[in-house]
Amino acid sequence: MSLNYAKRMDNIKASEIRELLKLTQQPNIISFAGGMPAPESFPIEELVKIGKDVLENTGTLALQYGPTEGYQPLRDAIAKRMAKVKVDVKAENILVTSGSQQGLDFAAKIFINPGDIIVCESPTYLGAINAFKAYEPKFIEVSTDKDGMDMEELEEVLKNNENVKFIYVIPDFQNPSGKTWSIERRIKLVELANKYNIGIIEDNPYGELRFEGEVLPAVKHFDTEGRVAFLGTFSKILCPGLRLGWVVADKEFLNKFILVKQGADLQSSTISQMEVAKFLEIYNIDQHIQKIIDIYKVRRDVMIKTMEEEFPEGVSFTYPEGGLFTWVVLPEYMNARELALKALEQNVAYVPGGSFFPNGGNENTFRLNYSNMNEEKIVEGIKRLGKVIKESMR
Ligand SMILES: Cc1ncc(COP(=O)(O)O)c(C=O)c1O
């Protein structure tokens, strides 16, 4: 039987990461593939206490429908926390979403008619590419260097294309590249978006996971005309299983997100929202984030050091100052998808980089995650990977 599915389904393929993650569930695999937080960082004891408290004392509220915009005390707390990235907003500027992934889907739903253009970094987050593809956009990729997106190239794109709807950026410890935008590029991005009247979707799950130096002001901080929607999430600073993220935008812009949220799922889980609000009220989340940073910084250091020792000449990689990923570039003649199969034979997994380029190419790249494996496994996995790379080199 073949049902008559919508044309958009032709664009939607199973995420390569999901497929890989299935494989990497096996305990003997050293996986640098997913983007999963360290499970030992989850505040399980605290959440057990909070869960009991929320249900015992406010059970009828926790198990009931709530407002589409989100649970008010959580919106208040998120608005306050936005000061961390120098964004001064009120609760009325916050919509609670089911993870920031939902914010990505909504962004495309709000802006994209088939054939419209989304401008993004090259490479960019695979989950965003997949979410956006359902709305049948064209993608224009803009090159990046160590300071973020190339602003001259961006201006050429905006000048020469009429139906660019938004620019999608991950300015802090980008997934997949680990790169962080300079302040100058953030300011210039807003300037260009103002000049050409384009929206900006700033996706920022990792900004607070900075290992050295100060947390940088978000692009939203430089927004002068209300054209930036900032997407935040509790997934990487608390835990992803509660599925809570948020959108920050000026009122009119946020209203569009609220309208589509109503249609999508009415609201995010009331009980999850109440639990996180309680966590923020009675515990110090900054201390909790520091614990996560302490774990990831050591793992980043171990991964980078081992790569320096084990990867052959001709292979380069980024040095992330925070977040979860580093990005590896092999000599151009090499193919990271083919290499991934050889690595899997050695029980090591990563995500081939080609998947992060919406228009294809760049098959000589791959992404490594360092948050989810302990130091011993990182050393062993990188050693095996180094050997696989050396054996495949000319
Ligand atoms: C750049 C980026 N955006 C969004 C997400 C989605 O996160 P969540 O829906 O868990 O908030 C991720 C997850 O890894 C990500 O890396």
Image (cartoon, rainbow, N blue to C red):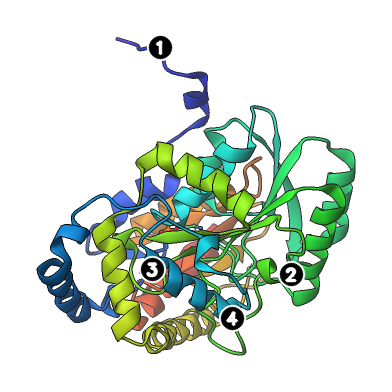
The N terminus is located in which quarter? top left
Q: Earlier in the sequence, mark 1 or mark 2?
A: 1
- Tell me what residue is drawn at x 38 percent, y 64 percent: 72
Number of the front mark, 1 or 2:
2
Please tell me the numbered disc located at residue 74: 3
Which residue type does callout 2 highlight?
A: Phe
Residue 85 image offset from top left, x and y in percent = 60, 77
Spatial CA distance of label 2 from label 3 is 25 Å
Spatial CA distance of label 1 from label 2 is 47 Å
Q: How many residues crowd mark 1 within 10 Å: few (<14), some (14–19), many (20+)? A: few
Number of the front mark, 3 or 1:
3
Q: How many residues crowd mark 3 within 10 Å: few (<14), some (14–19), many (20+)? A: many
Q: Earlier in the sequence, mark 4 or mark 3?
A: 3
Spatial CA distance of label 4 from label 3 is 29 Å
Most foreground residue, 307 or 345: 307
Number of the front mark, 1 or 4:
1
Q: Earlier in the sequence, mark 2 or mark 4?
A: 2
Q: Which residue is mark 2?
A: 222
Q: Which residue is mark 4?
A: 321
Residue 158 image offset from top left, x and y in percent = 84, 46
Which residue type does callout 4 highlight?
A: Glu
Number of the front mark, 4 or 3:
3
Vertical comparison of 156 with 240: above or below: above
